[in-house]
Image (cartoon, rainbow, N blue to C red):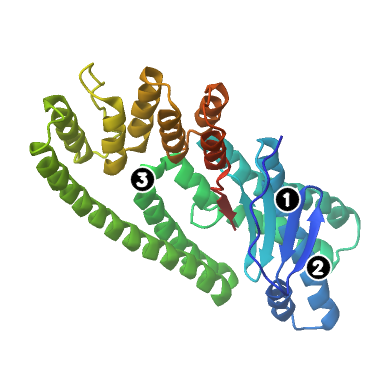
Amino acid sequence: MAQDPPLLPPASLSLRFRLGPFPVSVEPWFFFVPLIAFRASLWTALAWTAVVFASILVHELGHALAARLFGAGAAIRLYGLGGLTYHSGLPTARRRILVTLAGPGAGFLLGLLALGPYLLLPPSFAVRALLLTNVFWGAVNLLPVPPLDGGHVLEELLGPRRKVLALQAGAVVGALAAVGGFLLWGWVAAVMFAFLSLRSVGGWIRLAAEQRIQRQLTRLRQQMWEQALESDDVGAAHRDALRDTMRELHDVSHQQPVLPEPDQDRDPALLARIFEELGVSGRAADHAVEAHRSDPSDATALQAVRLLVAAGRRSEAEALVTRTRWSADATRAEAVALLQSPSPTRSRH
């Protein structure tokens, strides 16, 4: 069963309706932009607006249907510069990539349906516009430039540790597309792709700055924990685990740290708190689950559920809530609330 879709942003003047299970919100500016793009005649502008509305809605429906196929709720928003599909978080990169590609796929299918009338009947503006918006723009949308669908696919393929590389690729491809767009279609295409390229450059600079700050915070955390543990009686095993972890976090290769397995003299609940403070959510969750196995109380179960959700391992958290024998209904309700906390992702176009 699909999860409930995330709430759409409030907009008092938006047109709201449902397409099957999907809530749809259409902002007034969505109609204004295509209307002013074709000013040759009123009928041409209206026809173009209708084609753009149908094409983008079909595109977003492709995302929404794929998300629902994987058990996630979805909602659609059409706004002045395109569309967004809000959907609940998906657990794997493969599913997120398939949901992203489903949007252009739906557009290509609509363009294929328009190809028959284009070949068999006298050419009309509406049919040519359908081919343009669904086939041509669908291909452009697959360029590896964030926030296009191709950019989202590249980000998922490279993984969260290579976000800077994805933004660098987007900046380069966007700049090349701006030059090609200017030579083929004029300054409008050049401005659009130049904007996307500059957007990637801005994200690249911002992320690089955030990584520098994170490295500084990591060094400060190391000093803080070293000073705290020097005067604490938690034992040498915990200090060694902390120092091993910090050495791995400082690895210039940025590979996933291979941390030492806990020994019998290490308290898993304390290690869970230490790893959580260090930002290593996966290992914090592992130690919390181990702490619950050794001490199956409501407190350890709640800590394990919270850290599993934070690490993106929602299915394990759900299984833990189900199999735990809760001694207090209030604690169980708190664990269920953690599972139901929304963490929507976006497919942006």
How far is disc 2 from disc 1 in space, using C-alphas? 16 Å
| Picture residue at 81% right of the left edge, 53% below the top | 19
Q: Provide residue 119's location: percent of width, then percent of height.
A: 85, 54
State if disc 1 and disc 3 touch (CB < 8 Å): no
Q: Is residue 131 visible?
A: no
Can you say whether 14 is above or below 164 in the image? below
Q: Provide residue 33's location: percent of width, then percent of height.
A: 68, 76
How far is disc 3 from disc 1 in space, using C-alphas? 30 Å
- For the residue pair 149 and 328, the one nearer the viewer reads as 328
Q: Provide residue 333's location: percent of width, then percent of height.
A: 57, 38
Q: Quadrant of the C terminus?
A: bottom right
State which quadrant residue 266 falls in.
Answer: top left
Mark 2 residue type = Ala
Q: Provide residue 310's location: percent of width, then percent of height.
A: 43, 40
| Picture residue at 38% right of the left edge, 21% below the top | 295
Characterize the local packing of mark 2: few (<14), some (14-19) or many (20 or more) Cα atoms within 10 angstroms. Answer: some
Residue placed under numbered mark 3 in the picture: 162
Residue placed under numbered mark 2 in the picture: 50
| Picture residue at 66% right of the left edge, 44% below the top | 102
Characterize the local packing of mark 3: few (<14), some (14-19) or many (20 or more) Cα atoms within 10 angstroms. Answer: some
Q: Is residue 185 left or right of residue 30?
A: left
State if disc 3 and disc 2 touch (CB < 8 Å): no
Characterize the local packing of mark 1: few (<14), some (14-19) or many (20 or more) Cα atoms within 10 angstroms. Answer: many
Name the N-terminal-most of marks 3 and 1: 1
Mark 1 residue type = Leu
Q: Quadrant of the N terminus?
A: top right
Q: Is residue 16 left or right of residue 187?
A: right
Q: Which mark is residue 61?
A: 1
Name the N-terminal-most of marks 2 and 1: 2
- For the residue pair 80 and 117, the one nearer the viewer reads as 80
How far is disc 2 from disc 3 in space, using C-alphas? 40 Å
